[in-house]
Amino acid sequence: MCHTTFHIILQQRATERVLFSMVTRRRTADVRVCENTAVPGEITEK
């Protein structure tokens, strides 16, 4: 019993890490897009 529950906990943590990494990647990508569009004035002037 203990071994199976421990294995399930490890699986849950692994899936949480994958989801967390996906969310962080999306956030960083969104931030990069926002920076690229908002920060430089050259793009807005054109």
Image (cartoon, rainbow, N blue to C red):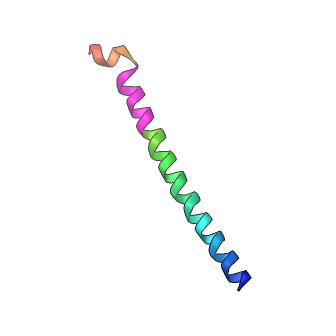
The image quarter in which residue 17 lies: bottom right
> Can you name the residue that lies furthest to the bottom here?
1
Does 20 lie within the magenta span? no
Marks counted in the figure total 0
Relative height, residue 32 to residue 17 (above, below): above
Q: Give the residue drawn at x 49%, y 46%.
A: 25
Q: Give the residue drawn at x 35%, y 14%.
A: 41
The C terminus sits in image quarter: top left
Nearest the camera: 8 or 26? 8
Q: Give the residue drawn at x 38%, y 30%.
A: 34
Residue 2, x across and y down, in percent = 73, 82
The N terminus sits in image quarter: bottom right
Nearest the camera: 16 or 46? 16
> Can you name the residue that lies furthest to the left here?
46
Residue 35, x across and y down, in percent = 42, 27
Nearest the camera: 4 or 31? 4
Does 32 lie within the magenta span? yes
What range of the chain is rendered magenta?
Answer: 30-39
Relative height, residue 6 to residue 20 (above, below): below
Relative horizontal placement of residue 7, taking residue 29 as reference (left or right): right
Residue 9, x across and y down, in percent = 64, 71
Q: Main secondary structure of the magenta part?
A: helix
Relative height, residue 30 to residue 7 (above, below): above
The image quarter in which residue 38 lies: top left
Relative horizontal placement of residue 26, taking residue 12 as reference (left or right): left
